[in-house]
Amino acid sequence: MNFSIIIPTYKAEKYLISLLDKLYHQSISNNIFELIIIDSSSTDKTVEIAKRYTDKVIVILSSEFDHGGTRAKAAEMATGDVLIYFTQDALPYDEFCIENIVKVFKDKNVAAAYGCQISYPNTNLFGKHLREFNYPSVSSIKTKDDIEIYGIKTCQLSNSFAAYRKNVLIGLGNFKNNLILGEDVYIGAKMILAGYSLAYVSDAKVYHSHSYTILQDFKRYFDIGVFHASEPWILKEFGKATGEGGRYVKSELNYLLKNNAYHLLPNWFFRNAMKFLGYKLGTKSKKLPLTIIKKISMHSRWWDK
């Protein structure tokens, strides 16, 4: 099975050497794969570094970057049967992450798969819990029959490290252009409803995490609200996100208590209140002035479109 690795970049100089060196020291035989790097006109040494590793470096205007559209463009030019996407700040945990995520495609019904994200050592407790909650130690495969059990998590994917069967991805319309975020969940939902399955591969591991501030979490959840409001069919088909949110909040509280982080309980309360407020505002973004929206959105440049 041939595969392509695709990495969108922007000012990735501090990440790229480590990421690409790790990719070229994977366990896959002869390290034969197509590497496509699509850069949004970085002003540092990103493109220079990328060209040391591949001749397939595409540079686009930074104003042209789109979470779905940019990845769709790379998918169309890729030659692999399986397309593996990384974000620039993800780092393979070991030499087996590519081998382990690719082998799940031996199951002909698997249309996409995502790997386990492990928090970097310096991540705060909120960031660590997020990774442990969303990326358990047990692998799974979900189908349309699992919607009643898992709800919106049935279509969970993450393009920080995910792989797609190209003919299915393209056949279902590719990643959608002009989404503020969630291009992975969007196509995952379409794959599930079309009768395909999505795999979570716990032994395909990467380091990837963030230590968001309360304000950053507020902005992130605002954008999630915008995404859900723009694609209401996802919640209609898979269920509202509030049930999963409640389970997450309880789990996070227990995680803080288990780690004796009692001093973070006020932070926990205020953080989750701001997440809820951000999400609700995001779902009502059409009623808000653009000047306000751009200040409370994590992806403020998206609104220029």
Image (cartoon, helix red, strand yellow):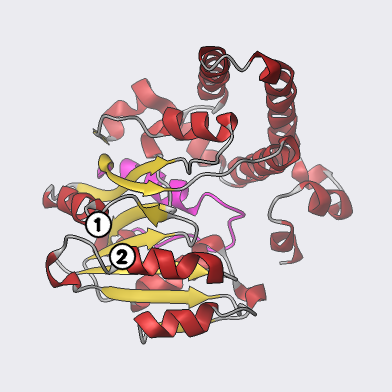
Q: Mark 1 points at which residue?
A: 98
Where is residue 108 shown, x and y percent of the image? Answer: 13, 50
Find out whether the residues at labels 2 and 1 contact each other: C-beta distance under 8 Å.
yes
Q: What stretch is highlighted in magenta?
A: 172-199
What kind of residue is marked 2? Answer: Leu
> Neighbour class for label 1 at 10 Å: few (<14), some, many (≥20)?
many
User: In screen coordinates, is 234 left or right of 104?
Assistant: right
182 over 242 or under it: above or below = below
Residue 194 visible in the displayed image: no
Determine the residue positioned at 75% across, 66% down.
Answer: 304
Dot label at residue 23: 2
Question: Magenta includes 184?
Answer: yes
SS of the residue at dot 2?
helix
Image quarter where the N terminus lies is bottom left
Asked whether 245 or 151 is in front, the reply is 245
Where is residue 22 shown, x and y percent of the image? Answer: 32, 63
Where is residue 31 shown, x and y percent of the image? Answer: 19, 71
220 over 4 or under it: above or below = above
Q: In front of the other: label 2 or label 1?
A: 2
User: In screen coordinates, is 292 left or right of 43?
Assistant: right
User: In screen coordinates, is 164 left or right of 40?
Assistant: left
> Neighbour class for label 2 at 10 Å: few (<14), some, many (≥20)?
many
What kind of residue is marked 1? Answer: Ile
